[in-house]
Image (cartoon, rainbow, N blue to C red):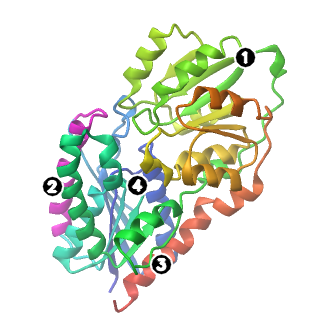
Amino acid sequence: MKKRILLLTFFYPPDLSAGSFRAHALVEAMRLQSLGCAHIDVLTTQPNRYHTHAKIADSVEDSGHVRIRRIQLPPHKSGMLDQSRAFVQFARIAARLAREERYDLVIATSSRLMTAVLGAWVAYRQGAKLYLDIRDLFVKNIDELFSAPLARPLSAIFGALERFTIGRAHRVNLVSRGFLEYFNARYPGRPFSLFSNGVDKDFVDFPVSAPAPQIEQRPVEVLYAGNIGDGQGLHLIIPQLAKQLEGKVQFRVVGAGGRLQMLQQAIYEQGVTNVELLGPVARKELLNMYHQSDVLFLHLNDFQSFHRVLPSKLFEYAATGKPIWAGASGYTAEFIGKEVTNAGVFAPCNPADALQAFQTLHFEQIPRPEFVLRFARNRIMKPMATEVLELMNSGE
């Protein structure tokens, strides 16, 4: 009799999200390795990562060994309250759908903890094994995301939920090695896996672009593509840099998020004319934008909790061979210094340091084949899928 696996993920293709691409790669790796001996159920949402770029996908896809069910969410934007309401809808319906089946293993891939909590609850109710894929330090972030009167009770509540969730899990994977210090301190003696983010197949064979016109004869094209939220803090850095580099650099910012309006306001107030803002685009169009750019821009806000993260966008950027201009600290800065060539790293939210880092870049595409080979998503997902299937078949 086939064993049954449930994967809970808030994002799944065709949604545009690092969590979406990661979840899909894990499903494909499990499908190939299980050799038809397991049935995989995916409970996810209709595309909703960016409300300006959401398209309806099939509510149910069933290929025989994999069934994907997408839950329709109420309209929402990037605000915390909107996102909370959307998650409550997802959790309520996902829990009901899960009760209709019996699962041997529940997998939850989670950034803001709550999908992991949902997975722990479903596994507990079903007496199933639980595998967690943790992609962020949500409890650690609370003190910096909320004001003091609210942060303390929220930290206590979510801390308790985290203890329940991690305590219920049979295996826990951390997407960043930088998370280990936090989790080892809170859960001493517990082993953690470290299957990181990686390079998606769209970027594995990223071609070398034709030589661009001489950089001295035109502005340098700098591209940022991704979320525009508190975590990125673009409103705290791009307007200042653009103002100081007028005539020398043209910024193109592609994406959406909760701080887009603040970025627009800062650009207006500082009279910046060399920043172009574009909404989220499909993967194919984004690849073309990478080709056209001279430099790829990355920025993490100056939060203590971000000293431990490793942004998925970095793997995508590095695979292009383009120069990377990165505002980062802690583990991200260490990783870039060790693994990524032709990258100028500066202290977050520090325009003066950013300008110095910009001067160190070589404005040419230099492939990074060793990086791509080492961090190819498929290469990372194969051993992760093996670990998941071994847990399902073990006597634990």
In-image side of 35 versus 75 (left or right): right
- Sort mark 4 into few (<14), some (14-19) or many (20+) by Cα contacts within 10 Å: many
1 or 4: tag closer to the N-terminus: 4
* Outermost residue to the bottom: 395
State the CA–CA distance, disc 2 to disc 3.
29 Å
Tell me if residue 285 is in the magenta stretch: no
Seen in the picture, residue 169 relative to 225 is either above or below; the reply is below
Identify the residue under disc 3: 387
Q: Are marks 2 and 4 in contact (CB under 8 Å)?
A: no
Residue type beneath disc 3: Glu
Residue at horizontal 56 percent and vertical 54 percent from the top? 331
State which mark lies toward you, 2 or 4: 4
Q: Are marks 2 and 1 in contact (CB under 8 Å)?
A: no
What kind of element bears circle 1? Answer: loop
State the CA–CA distance, disc 1 to disc 4.
36 Å
In-image side of 21 versus 199 (left or right): left
2 or 4: tag closer to the N-terminus: 2
Can you give x and y, in whole percent of width and height, for residue 253 in the image?
54, 26
2 or 1: tag closer to the N-terminus: 2
> Residue 352 is drawn in which quadrant?
top right
Can you give x and y, in whole percent of width and height, for residue 202 in the image?
62, 48
State which mark lies toward you, 2 or 1: 1
Tell me if residue 83 is in the magenta stretch: yes
